[in-house]
Image (cartoon, rainbow, N blue to C red):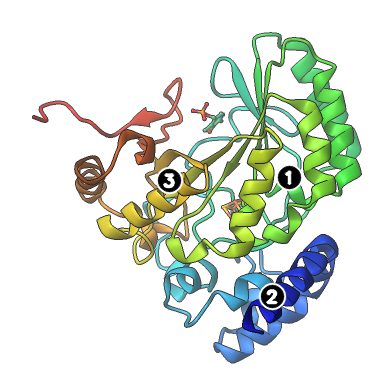
Amino acid sequence: MKGIQKLIMSTEDTNTIKTNWKQILRESPEVSKRAAQKFQISKKWFGPAPELFPFKLNGYWLRLITAPDDPIGVQTFPDEKEFQETASASVDPLQEERYRKAPLIIHRYRDRALFLVSNTCAVYCRFCTRRRQVGRPPFPRQIQIMESLNYLRAHTEIRDVILSGGDPLMLSDSRIRRLLVQLRRLPQIKILRIGTRMPVTLPQRITEPLVKILRHFQPLYILTQFNHPAEMTSESRRACTLLVEHGLPVLNQSVLLKGVNDDPEVLLDLMRKLVEIRVIPYYLHQLDPVRGALHFRVPVEKGREIMQYLWAHTGGMAVPTYVFDNPEAPGKIPLYPCAGQS
Ligand SMILES: *Cc1c(COP(=O)(O)O)cnc(C)c1O
Ligand code: SF4
């Protein structure tokens, strides 16, 4: 009897998963307001003030939060500390605006570029490096997309394009398909990547119809961002498995965050769980010194201790590269192993 009930429930689950990501997003403003009331978040975080990075979550993500200071709550709920850190931090720590070569193109490294096709996400992460533009207008327009594609066409040194934002999977399936078709018309672009937190923050977005579109544009890699083992649910596992089984490798880029995952056992657990579902731990990012997010910073020394712990307790497949980003460097800079280490 129990087995049958379980089976019925899982069939219901798959049925709702197929149809309801749009519904979850439609309800997200209302759900965010209710969550703010419940957890006593000030109304100002919904306001239009330009210095505020808006608060937004959705019904799926809310279910994972047990308290505002648990590892998922901390990533999601705004904190007054965001205002206390203006001196040493920048709104654009990576100087991306300097490298904005077309309306939506950040071209900083030799053979790869970011294409910022979306300005919104399913959840706004409080530590977001691009919080200066995420969650607020102006939203990418068709003319900007065309101009950006023209830049890519003219710059034949670019062989790897990363759709980013915001979250590109906030776009509809048909818009995503159109974009990928346009990119695949440029023969110099060998690799496509999509940077998306949807497998984590709204795994219902990863549908059969979506992956059936994406698989036509291989090699196409999915870069996602699990930060804590509590984010690994049956839904997120299903989403990653669906991607992988359609030939879309999933790579994970965690951000090292104080109060979330600055703990060797927590990251060891996360990395092992990722490998179990065939998601490859790619990067562990030292947080960029972005204004409003400094309270999430973890000292590099602590990060290195965690790296040492991972190497000592599991295999290389489960160990990401610990990196930081410097606007002057030709690529990400590894922080581990470091000189003088035995
Ligand atoms: C991180 C980043 C990339 C991708 O770097 P990889 O090391 O190839 O993953 C590309 N462009 C910019 C501007 C970046 O910040
Ligand atoms: S999903 Fe990515 S772009 Fe969106 S708020 Fe989070 S970190 Fe920023």
SS at circle 3: loop
Please state, as top left, top right, bottom left or bottom right, where the N terminus lies in the image: bottom right
Percent from the top left, x then y, of residue 28?
A: 75, 73
Q: Nearest the camera: 33 or 185?
A: 185
Amino acid under disc 3: Asp
**Can you say whether 234 is above or below 268 in the image?**
below
Can see residue 315? Answer: yes
Q: Nearest the camera: 3 or 121?
A: 3
The alpha-carbon separation of the residues under discs 2 and 3 comes to 29 Å
Can see residue 164? Answer: no
**Can you say whether 202 is above or below 271 in the image?**
below
Q: Which residue is mark 1?
A: 168
How crowded pointer 3 is (Cα within 10 Å; few <14, some 14-19, many 20+) is rated as many
Q: Which residue is mark 3?
A: 288
Dot in front, 2 or 1 = 2
Percent from the top left, x then y, of residue 98?
A: 58, 30
Dot in front, 1 or 3 = 1
Q: Residue 246, located in which quarter of the rendered image?
A: top right
The alpha-carbon separation of the residues under discs 1 and 3 comes to 21 Å
Q: Which residue is mark 2?
A: 59
How crowded pointer 1 is (Cα within 10 Å; few <14, some 14-19, many 20+) is rated as many
Amino acid under disc 1: Pro
